[in-house]
Image (cartoon, rainbow, N blue to C red):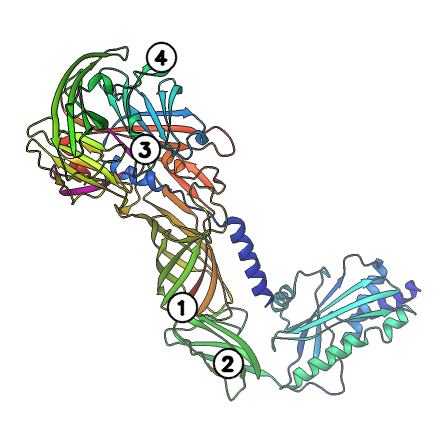
Amino acid sequence: MVRKALAAACLLLFLSPVLRLSSEEPVTPEERMRRLLLFFELAPGSNFSQEEQLLLYESLLVRLGSASRRVAIKEYPPRAPTASDAQRTALARTLGADSWLGVSLAGNWRSVVLRAGSYDLIGQATAFSFELRKPMRRGAVDLERDFWDEVTAAVAEYYSEAAANRTVPGEVVFQARPGTRILGAGPEALRADSDGVARAEVQVPVTLSVRATRPGFFPVEGKYFLSRAQNTVPLDMNRGARFAFDVYLNNLIFPGFQFSYFLIPGLLYARTGFTTNLVGLLFSDSGSEGESGLLISRPLNQLDLGLGVYLNDEDRDLRAYAGLGAFARLLSTLSYFGLEPIAPWGLQASLGIEYSRHPRRRFYLELAPMLLFTSRPDLVFASFAPDYSLVGYTFLPWGVFEFLNLRLGFRWEI
Amino acid sequence: MKRLIAFGGAAMLGVLFLGCRLPPFDEGLSLAMITAAKLEPVVKIGPIQAWHGDFEGTDSYFLPFKDTPASRNGFVLSASAYYLRVRYLDGNGGSFLGEVRFEGPAADPNRKTYTAVPLKGGEYLSLALFDPTNSANNSLVLVYVSPPNVTNTVANLYGTFIPDFSSGLDRIAGVHLSPIDATTERFSFFAVLNTAGHFGEVEADVVLTNDGGIGTISLDPLRQDMALPSLPKLGSGAFYYHRPVTPNTSYLSCYDASTGDFRNFAWDDTLRLREMTGMKGRIDALLSSGELLSLAHGSCYVYDAGGGFKYSFPMGGLHFCFEGYDAAGVARLYFSLLYWIYGYQSGSDKLYIDIYSLPTAELGTLN
């Protein structure tokens, strides 16, 4: 049976790799022939012989060739699994196609699991995606008759319709602030020129999902419909936050606050903060003498100053940032107010994540490791309470590194 | 919502796991180092292997020997609410060699019941012990080192020094020691006499022998019987100081139970009692410069001879030991700082002691 089918299939091999339906209705010049790159893959664990694979592939090729007069099939010869849809899209662009069809088969000759999906690069939309289990009762006959009907119908329906939309080459013009980076109008990001204009060639009509970013400004994201009559997209961007204020608990014990000034709004900040140990909430036994209960008080304060940068855009729910600064430890007793003498200052990094659905009010958790400089590491060591855990500290000849310092807080951008 | 829950949960778990950590800070140590940075280091002692628990609940400090403050040897005193322990520390050998222990409360910060001063001439320590329940038990004990152990000798020296008073002696309420020369200490005693409102003062120049015995004694009944009727009724003991230069000013700090504060008085050869109301707290030292020191709240308050406040500086865990004269005859102040590095999960606790000094004339630099 398989040999018969193979012989029949071989008859089809005269067909070109690029098949086109010889329709009774010729394609008019305004209608654009769609170039569909075919990815044919066998899922891991599938059980098909070489002959069966060839039959399946060739029969699909033949059936697709007659699916629509507006669709030309382009083969992707390796027939190897591609990593992702994004990779398929990239390959399609590279090979000159404007859409792709991925067909993946699992199971075996008697029971085939068919997954098919297609993406329209022009429309920037998924054309279709489905999964079917197809029994193979009569082998090659089924392949010749109706095995591929769902795939060919989906291709014909979507791409005939898409082609009928009569998309034509056009141009989108973005009006934004100079230097604005614009994503969504092509494979590459655009950048607005000194006049605030960025242009890209697109097929119109089309709906573009555009994201515009510019340091110092709140990103703009939206869908814009473009036609031959309307091809200008104004991208009005608001300036990012200039100030921020936050309150926090350092190591869940001592309160503090910070004030930030954004040198580049929403991106680069200078931050100063103050943490006091004069009053704190201690939920666990400190292990130190004479300290018990919920409240703890120590005449130690920390004043810090640093620079930092946000690592992703201001409109993201989850934002990350990193910074570096210096701090001074201040002693505040009735008899003395000034620098703490044993470890008076140091450097402090900050690695934080913010979360909120509201871009101006955010919770944050920050890892703020500290490097304390001291000429007397022994006295820093002696400053710990008896039986205190030293996990998270590294003692150096010239300093002490505390790398598990945490801050949990809430930040308002102003 | 799921992301919010995941974020919040992860954050809380992380904070609970890693948080609740106190920064490395010891107020006493930090305050001490503010002043210590201005002092001249004399010697460092340690590490001494010791168990910190043996010192817990006590106010512990180190007193070096007066003649040889750099010898690394001396006494570690631990005062608690129940006892006073005096341990001899061999800082070179890194061990404690014996101790003497005196039962009774010693660590009430406001009603300290003893004064401890190292003496010249050898490895001596003078302890004036005041019994808060029975002033008849007040005693002056001389502790000296008798290697390899510390021992105490002459349980009560008062009888040795105190002459008969015409009004009859009720009790010795205060004692002050001041170095006179290389070998001689001057003991000054304040006596409560049997006649109400009458007090006596005695000076005794003592040369101590190397074996801890008493050598030459020169008694001077400074003021046999003086009437100080406005002096409040004294408890078991008071803190008494005498400056043996004209006009022979004496000072007395006595605890006023009604206010919970110390009241400070001064008189001189005119026998006119003057209360120094400008002083807050007890007089803890009288310096050769005539300045008075009061140690409280982690600070040292410096007053002039008339009780006028001059300035203060932080002390924290720093302890004022004594004033002595160096080989050049310069009066110097000695301080000690005792601190621990705990053994934590492994290793034993280690005790360290730093000793500092400063010429008395430069005390103002600590301001």
Quarter the C terminus of chain B occupies: top left
Q: Work out how far the residue at label 4 is from the one at label 2, CA to CA, in angstroms.
A: 102 Å
Discs 1 and 2 share one subunit? yes
Give the chain letter at badge 2: A
In the rendered image, which residue does mark 4 sit on? B147
Does A283 sit above or below residue A9? Answer: above
In the rendered image, residues at marks 2 and 3 fall on the same chain:
no
Q: Amino acid at mark 3?
A: Pro
Q: Which residues are magenta?
A: B304-326
Residue A95 falls left or right of residue B92 = right
Extreme residue in the bottom direction = A229
| Occupied quadrant, residue B167 | top left
Q: Which residue is mark 1?
A: A413
Decide which of tag 3 and tag 4 comes sooner along the chain. 3
Instruction: Give the vertical position of A22 relative to A386 (above or below).
Output: below
Tag nearer the camera, 1 or 3: 3
Q: Is residue B305 magenta?
A: yes
Asked if one can make out residue A123 in the rendered structure from this viewpoint, the answer is yes
Tell me the crowding category of disc 1: few under 14, some 14 to 19, or many 20 or more residues within 10 angstroms, Cα based: some
Q: Which residue is mark 3?
A: B132
